[in-house]
Amino acid sequence: MSSVEVPQLAARLHRTKLVPLCLPTPYPVGPVWVYLLRGEPLTLIDTGPRTRAAWESLKKQLAAFNLRPQDLERVLITHGHHDHMGLARRFQGYGARVYAHRADRNNLALRRSFRRLNQALAQLGVRAAQRLRMFVGLWLLDQTSLPLKEFVPLQDGQELDYCAGPIRVHHLPGHSPGHLAFQLPEGELWISGDALLAGKVPTAVLEPDPDQPERVFPALSVYRQTLVRLSSSPPQGLLPAHGPAILEVVELARTTLAKQQQRSQLILTHLPPQGCNLPELLATLYPTAAGLRLFLAYSELFGHLLHLQQEGLVRAEPSPRGLRFHRT
Ligand SMILES: [Zn+2]
């Protein structure tokens, strides 16, 4: 698959004054792209995390255009994860209007129900020591964002005013329930956050369903629908939050879908005839995961098991050591 760097693809736009800015993050994913749209209203798409390094880098890159953070009028958020929205509240404090999808309101506000998560993980047989290590990882992660409690809600299909033409909003849920992409006025280029990434499959994160908080958000099944949508009516290109620009959208959406299917299949083959619980599966497939990675590994495994259950390929049975998963 051929790849083109984000600044090269952005430079092909003529009317849109689009400037990709690369910011450091302290996370394993590496640096994040945020996008400045010069002109009226002065807009930033995603903000980077709330770290000193990201803030200093952002200020310096804005200064190259004679801009200060106070000059931003509008901030659009692709989704409520820390590397994308960590600084949104700071811009709001300076007077910018912040826009995001309502389904990510809990992520944006850092409203994490540790009690509910603790219960859910205990029911899955995860031991207290491991739960504690994960919660420390999540707490440390939450230090890299300012909670954003108020924002202007966006919906699929909505159009936002911009001097070079309207920006169209696309709802692409999965990696998070309220994940958005923003279609630029020229051509068919979308600023797409983590909806599709070259070389990696975006993780499914264990979180409550925003509409029915007593159940887990079925991230993988929902993401599959997004991938199908992206491969059936693809934009010409994507400007993602990480890695190179994406021109072969259909091919990448299909490859991502295939990789997910392979992963589900692999998990299925690791379920022994007598079944196993989630920690046993984790010990086989992610033996070295710790801290936040441990949480992401559990999220990923449970996401696949939930999907396999929905497909009728796996069933879960309560046992004294947490839910046991069996092949049907
Ligand atoms: Zn993300």
Image (cartoon, rainbow, N blue to C red):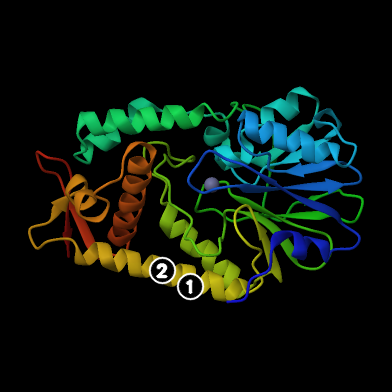
Q: CA distance from mark 1 to mark 2?
A: 6 Å
Q: Residue at point 68% right, 68% down?
A: 4
Q: Can you identify the residue that label 1 sits on? A: 255
Q: Residues within 10 Å of mark 1 (few under 14, many from 20)?
A: some
Which dot marks residue 101? Answer: none
Q: 107 or 256: which is nearer to us? A: 256
In the image, residue 128 sits, relative to residue 168, either above or below, namely above
In the image, residue 317 sits, relative to residue 69, either above or below, namely below
Q: Residue at point 64% right, 67% down?
A: 246
Q: Residue at point 76% right, 67% down?
A: 188
Q: Are marks 1 and 2 in contact (CB under 8 Å)?
A: yes
Q: Is residue 219 left or right of residue 98?
A: left
* Residue 61 placement (x, y as % from top left): 78, 41
Q: 133 or 319: which is nearer to us? A: 133
* Residue 222 placement (x, y as % from top left): 47, 57
* Residue 164 placement (x, y as % from top left): 91, 55
Q: Residue at point 62% right, 47% down?
A: 32
Q: Secondary structure at mark 1?
A: helix
Quadrant location of residue 152? top right
Q: Can you identify the residue that label 2 sits on? A: 259
Q: Quadrant of the C terminus?
A: bottom left
Q: Quadrant of the N terminus?
A: bottom right
Q: Residue type at mark 2? A: Lys
Q: Is residue 241 left or right of residue 208?
A: right
| Residue 112 visible in the snapshot | no
* Mark count: 2
Q: Secondary structure at mark 2?
A: helix
| Residue 183 visible in the snapshot | yes
* Residue 326 placement (x, y as % from top left): 16, 58
